Image (cartoon, rainbow, N blue to C red):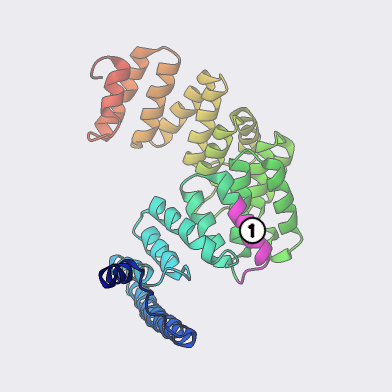
Amino acid sequence: MRLNSDNNNASAPREGRRWPAHLLVVGLVALAAQVVMVLAARQYQAEALISISDQMKRQKLYSRGYDAALQSVGLYPFTGYGYYFAADHAALLARPEEAARLLDRAEPFMPHLPQLLRFRGQILHKRREYAEAAVALARYLKMDPQPAGSAGQFIDLLAQCLYRSNQPAGATIELNRAESYAEYREVSLHARAINAVMLRQPAMALALMRRCEPPAGGSDPVDPKELFSAAASAQRLDTMSEVLEKYRREAPLSPAMNKVLALGYVKAGRASDGLMLLQLLAGQMPEDPEVWLLLGDISIEMQRRDWAASFYKEHLRRLPESPFAAEIEAKLGTKP
């Protein structure tokens, strides 16, 4: 009987040791306090690294600033500032794709920071993601309608993003808003003129160009490259050519704008007019290799390979290391 009793006792489960409830609470509180202290220490270190990153920017040591910002993210990623500063340095290092990715990581932590939206809009504009850039800049200007010293610049940039993404009606709304502020009225004229081309309003575009003060360092009413890029992307080169042709009768155009007009003629099916204009420019500035290159391109469009070979030869004589040499040879099937 005793043996059986011992066996029964051996097979009976033993109850584990139970801690008093108040000791468990104390232990959890102590653990939570330790976690909070560790996080606080990491946050402090992360903020110190952000300060270092900012100092590196002032000293133009962008790689070191970028590294410091990413170290901050590794320590404490919950404020977004590490991502933001890393994006700033990536942009300064000419890495806009990486800057955009880092801003995407920062935005959930700081969705109401106007500077982030402004920065995001600028980066997306540089990447030619105009529709997304317009959304970011519109949100930015809604949060900060009159940013000190730069409102005209960003209203102009927003309008540019809108008409570049084939939203000229939206650009008109923003530019009309700019017109309500006297200090921005003149700044918006250049964008209004280009937007009128996008809207196929040549008379309005011409009237606005007459009112434009040339951009800094230029002589044309609007920037030639911006006008051509916008018109080409929206298939408005015919309207652009019509406006420039009329404006040219009233005031001289720069060589750069005359090249834009010549290209507009070609794309609008007026290759012979484009050729004549460029030949005129070649007489005025015979040492400009781009004029001869464009003459060759237009001759190819007109299926005059003999003319093209002659013009391309002049281009290569003035620019022996031309980056277009291989393309020219491919077009002609031989060296000019």
Q: Specify the amino acid type for callout 1.
A: Arg
Residue 112 vs residue 283: left or right? right
For the N terminus, the image quarter is: bottom left
Q: Image check: 25 left or right of 313?
A: right
Question: Could you say whether the residue bearing mark 1 is in a helix, strand or loop?
Answer: helix
Depth order, front residue of 225/28 = 28
Query: What is the x, y in percent for residue 68?
Result: 32, 71
Q: Residue at x 52, y 66 (%)?
A: 109
Quadrant of residue 48 within the rendered picture? bottom left
Where does residue 328 sit, x and y in percent of width and height?
Answer: 30, 23
Magenta stretch?
A: 135-148
Q: Is residue 38 visible?
A: yes
Where residue 318 sits, quadrant-wise, is: top left
Between residue 127 and residue 227, name the one nearer to us.
127
Q: Magenta segment: does it hold 139?
A: yes
Name of the residue lying farthest toward the right = 180
Q: Position of residue 305 (x, y in %)?
A: 35, 13
- Residue 133 located left or right of residue 180: left
